[in-house]
C-alpha cells in the first residue's frame, strides 16, 4: 500500500501532489518510503498527517480506508 501511495503521487499529472506539498520529491529513497509507509499505517488508525492533495490521491485514500474498514470488520466478525 505504501508503494502504491507513493506511485499515485509520483505518476500524477496534477498541479499539486502530496510529494510536492511535503517536499520529499528530492528526498532519499528511504525517507520517501518511510513517509509513504507512515501514511499507510496511519490510514488504518484514522489519524493522518499526510493528506491527499488532488482527486487521484483522494480516491486512492478513500479506497484504502474502505479496505481497512472491511478488513477490521472481517477480523472482528471472525473473533465473535
Image (cartoon, helix red, strand yellow):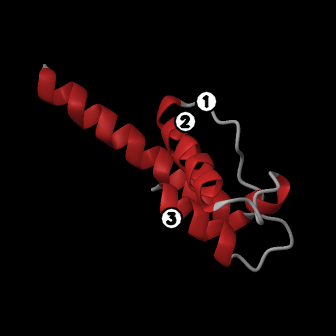
57 vs 20, left or right, is left
Residue position marked by numbered label 2 in the rendering: 42
Q: Are marks 1 and 2 in contact (CB under 8 Å)?
A: yes
Q: Nearer the viewer, mark 3 or mark 1?
A: 3
Instruction: In the rendered structure, find residue 4 and report the number of the disc placed on it.
Output: 3
Residue 54 versus residue 9: which sits nearer the camera?
9
Mark 3 neighbour class, 10 Å CA radius: few under 14, some 14 to 19, many 20 or more = few
Q: Is residue 14 above or below residue 62?
A: below
Q: Which quarter of the image is occupied by the C terminus?
A: top left
64 vs 26, left or right, is left
- Sequence-first disc among 1 and 2: 2
- Sequence-first disc among 3 and 1: 3
Element assignment for label 3: helix
* Residue depicted at x 55% and y 31%: 46
Residue position marked by numbered label 1 in the rendering: 47
Residue 55 versus residue 50: which sits nearer the camera?
50
Q: Are marks 2 and 3 in contact (CB under 8 Å)?
A: no
Q: CA distance from mark 1 to mark 2?
A: 5 Å
* Residue depicted at x 58% and y 52%: 36
Q: Is residue 19 above or below residue 62?
A: below
Amino acid at each position: 500500500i505504501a508503494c502504491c501511495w507513493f506511485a499515485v503521487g509520483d505518476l500524477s499529472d496534477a498541479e499539486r501532489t502530496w510529494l510536492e506539498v511535503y517536499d520529499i520529491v528530492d528526498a532519499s529513497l528511504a525517507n520517501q518510503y518511510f513517509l509513504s509507509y507512515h501514511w499507510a499505517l496511519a490510514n488504518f488508525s484514522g489519524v493522518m498527517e499526510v493528506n491527499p492533495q488532488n482527486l487521484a490521491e483522494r480516491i486512492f485514500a478513500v479506497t484504502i480506508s474502505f479496505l481497512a474498514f472491511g478488513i477490521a470488520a472481517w477480523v472482528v466478525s471472525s473473533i465473535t
